[in-house]
Amino acid sequence: MKDNRPSAEPPIPLGYRRRTSAVRRRALPIALLLLGVWLSVGCIPFPSSQQYMMNGKLRPGWAVGTGKDSAVRLGYATTQQAVDFLSQRIAGEQ
C-alpha cells in the first residue's frame, strides 16, 4: 500500500531540473572562455601610441601633410624628395 503521508521536501517542479542542468552545461564553457580571454591579455601587442618609434623619435609620417609647416607637403614634394627626407628621419640624421 502507498504511504499517503506528506513528505518533508516538496516535489521539484519539472522545468527546474532542466533549467539547472542547462545553466551548469553553459557555465563551464563560459567560465573557460572568460578565463582564456583574461589570460591572453597582453599576448597580442597593440601599440598604445602611434606617434613615436621604438627609439623615442616621432614617426616619419608626422612630417607629411598639407600645411605649410609640414616638411613633406602633399602636392608639392616629388616622390624622390619624400623618400629622401623620410629615409633621413628614420636613419636619425635629423
Image (spheres, grey):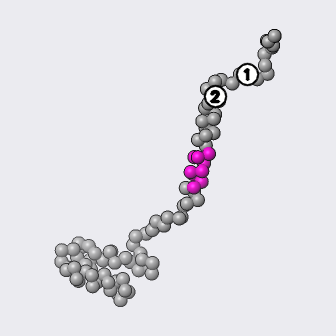
Residue depicted at x 76% and y 23%? 9
Residue 67 circle label: none
Q: Residue furthest top?
A: 1
Kind of element beneath mark 1? loop
Residue type at the position of mark 2: Tyr
Question: Which quarter of the rendering shows the C terminus?
Answer: bottom left
Picture quadrant of residue 7 = top right
Q: Badge 2 is on which residue?
A: 16
Residue depicted at x 53% and y 64%? 42
User: In this image, 20 relative to 47: left or right?
Assistant: right
Residue type at the position of mark 1: Pro
What segment is highlighted magenta in the picture?
Answer: 28-36
Picture quadrant of residue 55 = bottom left
Front residue of 29/52: it is 29
Kind of element beneath mark 2? helix
Categorize mark 1 by other alpha carbons within 10 Å: few (<14), some (14-19), many (20+): few
Q: Badge 1 is on which residue?
A: 10
Question: Which quarter of the rendering shows the N terminus?
Answer: top right
User: In this image, 35 relative to 78: left or right?
Assistant: right
Q: Earlier in the sequence, mark 2 or mark 1?
A: 1
Front residue of 4/51: it is 4
Residue depicted at x 39% and y 72%? 51
The kind of secondary structure the magenta stretch mainly shows is helix
